[in-house]
Image (spheres, helix red, strand yellow):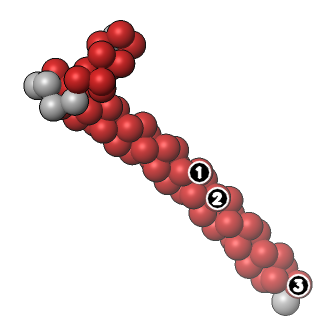
Amino acid sequence: MSYQLSAISYQLSAISYQLSAISYQLSAISYQLSAISYQLSANALRALALMGKSPDLKFSLISQS
């Protein structure tokens, strides 16, 4: 009986480790998606500025490029 409990405990520990690894990977994916979202927002603002929708924004974005 003690052996079975030890085996179950080991399996649960392995599952816990795998779930932690999955959580880490999902966090990394979330970070990457946030970075992509930021880049898309910046590109959209830059496009608006270049179309002359906001002269002040156009000047500030072009000077940063």
Rendered view: 59 above or below 40: above
Q: Amino acid at mark 1?
A: Tyr
In percent of width and height, residue 19 lies at: 60, 63
- Can you identify the residue that label 1 sits on? 24
- Residue 32: x and y in percent read 43, 40
Residue ID at (11%, 25%)? 51
Q: Quadrant of residue 5?
A: bottom right
Residue on which the image places disc 2: 20
The part of the image, by quadrant, that contains residue 34 is top left
Picture disc at residue 2 = 3
Q: Is residue 12 above or below residue 39?
A: below
Residues at badges 2 and 3 in contact (C-beta under 8 Å)?
no
Residue 54 vs residue 26, the one in the foreground: 54
| Closer to us: 65 or 39 | 65
- Whole-percent x and y of residue 26? 49, 53
For the residue labelled by badge 2, is the local secondary structure a helix, a strand or a loop? helix
Mark 3 nearby-residue class (10 Å; few <14, some 14–19, many ≥20): few
Q: Are marks 1 and 2 in contact (CB under 8 Å)?
A: yes
Evaluate whether residue 18 shows in this view: no
Quarter containing the C terminus: top left
Taking depth in this image into account, of 47 and 12 the one nearest to the observer is: 47
